[in-house]
Each structure stands twice: as C-alpha cells, then as structure tokens.
Image: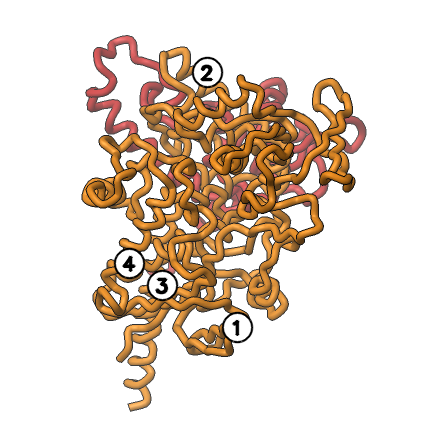
Amino acid sequence: MLTMKGKYGLKAMLYLAGTPSGSFALSEEIATANHISKKFLDTILGDLRTAGFVHSRKGRNGGYTLARDAAQIRVGHILRVLDGPLAPIPCASRTAYRRCNDCQDEESCSVRLVMLEVRNAISAILDEKTLSELRSMPQLVDQTAEQLAING
Amino acid sequence: MSAGRIIIVGGGATGVILAAHLLREDTAGLRVTIIERRAQIGRGIAYDTDEPDHILNTRAGSMSAYADDPEHFWRWLQSNAPSLPDAVCPDAFCFVRRGLFGLYLDALVTDWLPTQGDGRLEVLQGEVTSLKTSEFGVAVELATGELHIGHAAVLATGHPVPAYGPQSPYISPWQCSSDTIGTDDPVLILGTGLSMVDSVFQLARQGHSGPITALSRRGLLPRPHQRTKPLKIDAADVPFGTELSYLTHWFRQTARWRIEHGADWRDVIDGIRPHIQSIWQSLPLEARQRFLRHARSFWEVHRHRIPPESNARLSTMIAEGRLRILAGRLLATEPTAMGHRARIRHRDSRREEQLDIVRVIDCTGILRPQESCDDGLSAQLIARGLARRDALNIGLDVDDGCALIDPSGRSVPRLYAAGPVTRSRFWEITAVPDIRVQAAMLAARLRTQLSGGNNRTAAQNTTAG
C-alpha cells in the first residue's frame, strides 16, 4: 500500500519537477509547500538521493534537484525505493517477503495469489507513468470536467 | 500479389533463427534471403567449430530456437543421436558439442530451402558491399555486383571480430592454430572469460604443452553451472531506474536472503534474467557506462557460466601449473628474437613482471569499440545517414522494435538489426534464449509491416479507381 513516505516522496519529486531546471530547492521550502515535517522529508530525500533520483548540493544556493529530466523518471520507480517492492499486502511480494501471522501455506493461499496479480497490475500502471505526466494530470482532469460541462 | 521478401545480412545463429521465425509462422508466401560470407549458414563465430572440447555453455534444454517450444533442440538431439554419436544427451541439463548446434541451425531451415523444401528461403554466399533504401524497398549489392531487391532488410552481422595483421603480437582466438603457435611456445591470453577457456582447450587439443598465462583486470574466472531452480521475481520487485550502486546493493541483498534460505546464488541470477532488458533500459546512460567499466566482469562470471566438466578440467590445468591466471594489466609488448616480451603489472602487489611469449591471444571478448573492427557495411550506413552508432559505442542504435535509428534520432523505415548488433539497446541479447525472443518479436513486426504495406497499396488502388 502507499505509505506516507511514498506519498510525501512523490509530492517532493513533483515539487522539484516544477522548479526551473538547474535550480536547487531547499528541503524546508518543499516541506512548507506540502505541509510535511522537514525532518521526515529529509529522510525521504536522502533515500531518493541514494537511489539516484535527486542530486543535492550543500551551502548557499544548495538544496535538491532532479537527477534526470522528469520525463525520464517513472512513478513506480520512485515508489519502489521509498516503499519497497510494490505490493498491496506484505506477503504479496517475491523478494521482501513477509509471512502473515495466520499464514498456513503461502503457496496455496488464494488471497496472496490474487494480490500477486494485483501488484503486477499496479506496477504496470505506475511504471508507465512518468513524473512529468503525473504533473500534468490535474489539468487533464479539469479538461475532462469542462468537456462534460460543455456536452451536458 | 507477392507477399514480400526480407533480406537478412548475416547467416549466423541470429540470421538463421530469425529466418525460421519468419518462415514458420507465415502462410502468405513470404520469402527470405540470407546473405552470408561463409560457405555455410549457422556457422557464425559461435558455432563454426568442430572442436570436440568446444561445448555449449548453455544446457541443451535452453538452446531451442523457439521460446514457445523449449525442447525443440533437445528433441532434435534425441532423434539424431543414432547418426551423431556425440549427440548423446540423456537429459536436457547436458552440455553438448557446439558444432552440433550449427548442424541444428542447418536442420532448422531445410524445410524452406529450394533443394529439400518449398524454396521460400534463398541462401547466398557473398559479401554485402552496399545497402540502400527507397520508398518501396531495399536494394542490397554484393561484392560481385549482384543486386538483390527486398521489402525490408535486417542486419544480423553478429559480433565484431578484431582483425590482426601477421606482424602484430596479437592474434584472435580464431587464428589460434598449430601454424601460429608451436607445441612448447609460451602464450599470453588477454582475458579470463569464456573465450579464454575455449582457447586453452583448443591449444591443449592441438598438443600444446607450453606455459599459458591468462591475464585480465580482475582475474575472475567464469563460475560453473549447476542445476538451478530460478527464483520467481516479478517486475514489481525490481528497483528499476535506480543508480547502479543501489541496484547492485539490492541484488546482493536479495542473493544473500535467498542463500540464507538454503537456495543458490544461481537461482537469483537466473530469476532476474527475464528483467535484464528492462533494467538496462531504465538505467541512465552514465550508469550503463559505469556498469561496463566497473561491474560487468562481476556480472558476467556469474551470468555466463561454464559447464561443470569444463570447470573441472580448467581447475586441473591450473593446479598442474599449465595455466596461470593473473589479475593485472598489460603495459606494453616489444618484439624479441623468439616473439614478444610482455610487461605486466600485477593488480594487488603493483609488481611488474616481464614475460617472454610467442603470441598474445586476444580473448577480451565481444565488446569492442566499433571503429576497431572491420565492418564496412555499418560504417557505410552511418555515412549515408541510415544508421548511427549507439552512445556506448558497442553496436548500432535501434528502437524498441529493432529498427535502425538515423543520426537525427528517427527510426529508419525498412532497415532493422537483430542479435548482438543491438546490444546497446537490449544488453542481454547475445545468447540463444534471448535472441529467439527478439526474433519472434521482429518477425511479427516485419509481417505486420509487409501486410500493412500491401493493404496501403490496395487502398491507394481503390482510391485511384
């Protein structure tokens, strides 16, 4: 499931995607804009930096910037780094596998098997979507609403 | 109306497997022409060997030309075992002589040859000197001046092979014979991977008993095969798009986790394999460059393994002192009365060593800067604006559907590439299990393009009428 960490991380990435290229944003600025605690955000940005999605610079004019163009960064890729393997329940994963307490046999558990299918659908959607597409989604929603209003 | 003709430049494993995929699915009378410079098809640098010691590095059960019929090669071995004594392969895990795979590739396409089959496959021996495209098709010219016309062309020219002159201290593994290397001659081999193993066994078979030193930056040897139970890994598990360091860390952690649970590291390597192309494509360019420089040899010794029997033989030769494996760097070579003197610097001690040798066998593998290789055709296509080198300079740039990309970044209509030429885009595209998947995809795309083309012509006719 999408954790707070994943959600805030995506918001921070969206914020960085909206800043002019080459400029660095302070984590305080991102935290304030998204109403997130700066301390939590710093951990998140640290993880994103280790994974190579953002660059950071110290000192005056320092801060964070996207390591690549927003069109080159996939939403699913960001979330895996923050939340681990995409999975709706902990046992529906191959590598970060955690058994449920009440589990008797994970190989024949129907709930787990259907959730494995769900996670593949989740990753198919999130890996298709780039950060820049994610940014333009609100406008698309507005357009659809306008279309409906006109047609109605 | 003719269903179309596809011209495949190169009749090695890739070219033959692609031809089979094109012809086997087709019902509309599609024709294929393979142009190969060697006398036989299916005998590219991988399978043009009669050495009994050159065995496939992949088990028979994974060498089928068809992904949807994985035991095709193994069944062929079974049914031909009576006439080919060394084709005995009681279970699909066995490793057979590489030359047999060449025979299998022959057999794969006999149904379509003019002599034994329906004649939809034409095999020509020759050197392609020029390749041109027009709005309607492609024209391929051979060194003899012969011209062949088709609807599309596919470059399946395989691995670049270094060309060394007689004065050079270097020879390629394919020049390594008793004419070039005497029985007692000391030899230096550059590289400690699969080609080195091949060369060592070939030398031994020729009766060579001189000292062999094999040198590479890290001195890592290919790990041996073992039966595996590949770990099931879904795309949702893989941290795509992350830095190389992050990815490596994740991979090592996953391998450790499996080993703790009693599995083998090979299960993880084989489990990740279906995702390699996607991982490669999600890596930023700089990360791919870093991979080639720093991580590739670690990856390859685990990924490209040798049969247990080869491993045992290699270990014996090392134990007996006939083969020495060194980690270090070749600083220089200079000519001497007997041959050459090589100056080597050891990796860990930084100590320098002088080594008198007759020849240096270049087994540094299949990734070479493209300019260093004798490949007039790609150079010409690039000059004519029909292709460009990839950013890593290890092949040609292609799109996801294998079409060549021109210098401005557009896909070139009617010109495609397949197999190792496309490794910059797909990376894991040098072994049969990957080539057959690409061949199926490209064959489907070519058929769609040809039928689409015919429909368009038909539509235009209707409009005109």
Q: Helix, strand or loop at disc 3? A: helix
Q: Which mark is residue B143?
A: 1
Above or below for B29 versus B443: below
Q: Residue B203 location, x and y as percent?
A: 52, 36
Q: Nearer the viewer, mark 3 or mark 4?
A: 4
Q: Residue B263 location, x and y as percent?
A: 36, 16
Q: Residue at x 29, y 80 (%)?
A: B458
For residue B458, side relative to residue B155 (left or right): left
> Which residue corresponds to mark 3?
B446
Q: State whether discs 2 and 1 lie on one chain.
A: yes
- Rounded to the nearest whole Å, what is the CA distance between mark 3 and mark 2? 43 Å
> Which residue corresponds to mark 4?
B109
- Rounded to the nearest whole Å, what is the CA distance between mark 2 and mark 4? 44 Å
- Rounded to the nearest whole Å, what is the CA distance between mark 4 and mark 1? 25 Å
- Rounded to the nearest whole Å, what is the CA distance between mark 3 and mark 4? 18 Å
The amino acid pointed to by label 1 is Ala
- Of mark 3 and mark 4, the one earlier in the sequence is 4
